[in-house]
Amino acid sequence: MKFRNLYILFIVLLTATACSDAILDREELDVLPADQVLNTLDGVEAILFQVYQDGRSIHQDTEISLYKQCGTDLALNGTHMTDVSEGGMRGMMTYSGGLAATSDQITSIWDKYYGAIAKCNLVIQASDNFETTSEAEVNQIQKFKGEALTMRAAMYLELVRRFGNIPIAEPLPEGEPPRSEVSLAAASDVYNLIIADATEALDLLPTRAESGTVGLPSKGLANMILAEAYLDLGKYTDGAAAAEAVISDDSYWFQPLEVVFSLEGGKTGNENNEELIFSWVFDPAVVDQAQYTSVMYTPLYDRLPGVARSMEQGGRPWGRFSPTGYYWTLFEEEDGRLHAWHKLEWYFDDLEEGGIPDGFDPVLGEPVTQEYLEAWCSNDRECRYLEPTTTKHWEDGTYGRTTAEGEGYKNIILYRYAHAYILAAEAYALNGQQDLAAQKLNVLRERAFGNSDHNFVTADIETVIEEHARELGHEGHRWAFLKRLGLLKERATTHNVDAVNMQDHHLIWPIPQTFVDLSGVAQNPGY
């Protein structure tokens, strides 16, 4: 690839970590000789496996694991985001000096995505030149190509949204040495590549029902990427068509609210339920594969006397994130999502320790009151220790996690079926078809309320924006959604006290300075 020396791929050392077939359909492989890597199905698969490792690794880094949640109208700094470096999620939330070209964390995100793209290029190139000996091999190598095309499109989509004009990493001709000179492609050219990749992948991938797993790309994932890309470009008819293709895919159906984010049944149970389109999969049997998202939204509840740390109460707290006040104004009490996907109260469960404030006589099992908290806390930070929060990322002891551990093994959901309805509604609302937008949102409303009493007759874009928050809040889609609507700065600075420093140039992230220095490309304006 054009800047292969920056992301050199040591294919001689490619290995695949042990992983259950039920999770990723990927076999454990030993170290492969270089001459076999691109000439055998096992070798191509080993490279492809590392693409998933690269994508998953974002969530294994405590500094960037939830970077997509930062800087919107839905989440603000928790009480202990200060434990994160300014160049990490704290800077991304506050749009402060930490959102800088010299940020190690922004550089890491750039490197991880481009590292995955480099591997996708190798798989695509190998699949085009692969010598097959049977129909089964033809089908397998074409499926690998479909996966690589889809994952390359997903990586480029995230990069172009964050960084604007970016390099397109093209394979070098055979025998040509690596070179560092590179130019930035226009964002429109990157989107054309994303659309071309996802479109080609549709003919090569199985449906989600055929693959049987959330851990591998399917036609549904390719269509979700198409819908997102078309909407980013303002192509509402095409975006609606791609979203409708997911909606009509009989691989998917809605789950009860309490099932969507549940761990019951483990990796082959609810974590593989039919509402999920694609997830980054974590295997508790693999050493050093834990993720650090499960604890980020858990406030420090266990510092209050009378409230003990337990899995039922939330496990180990980290307090990095907290939903904004605006977020809570969006829910009606009858909305089932309010109670199914959030923790609104903590309970007295240990009255033997000291420190109970004078004048209080708490009872086991009763909820902790705001009056009790205020009688105990001595500063603004401590008074936030029982903030209500989302439980979408929470993990219990299903995979052996204890109350002392911050790491978890719950899969990270990238896309789910409900999102397709939101995308279709957005496309219809912006295309002047507000009745169709309402129809899509009402499917979600009826599940949320258990009836049609709260359905919309028509839905403009503001209606879509609010339903997007209720349905997809804290899943990592809000930043890109508001940006394409031209509302990110307005809504973040209005509803998030931590985002008041946001400026127009923050809509595009800085290109890592290390890359600028090596390649000679121009830095994004404002940095």
Image (spheres, grey):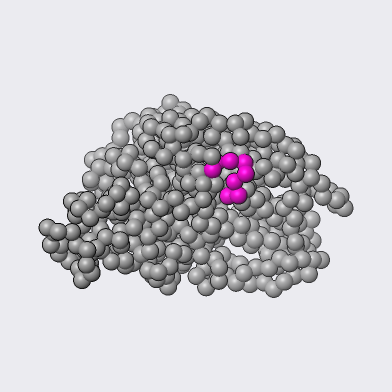
**From this viewpoint, is residue 28 visible?**
yes
Which residue corresponds to the image point at 42% horizontal and 59% vertical from the top-left?
294
Furthest-top residue in view?
432
Q: Position of residue 240 (x, y in %)?
A: 49, 36
Q: In front: 498, or 55?
A: 498
Magenta range: 98-105
Q: Position of residue 276 (x, y in %)?
A: 46, 55
Q: Position of residue 295 (x, y in %)?
A: 41, 59
Residue 311, picture quadrant: bottom left
507 relative to 358 in the view: left or right: right
Q: Position of residue 128 (x, y in %)?
A: 76, 53
Which residue corresponds to the image point at 35% horizontal and 42% vertical from the top-left?
324
300 relative to 11 in the view: left or right: left
180 relative to 491 in the view: left or right: right
Q: In front: 405, or 377?
A: 377
- Position of the C terminus, as image quadrant, is top right
98 relative to 185 in the view: left or right: left
Q: Main secondary structure of the magenta part?
A: loop
In magenta segment, residue 100: yes
**From this viewpoint, is residue 168 visible?**
no
Which residue corresponds to the image point at 42% horizontal and 55% vertical from the top-left?
296
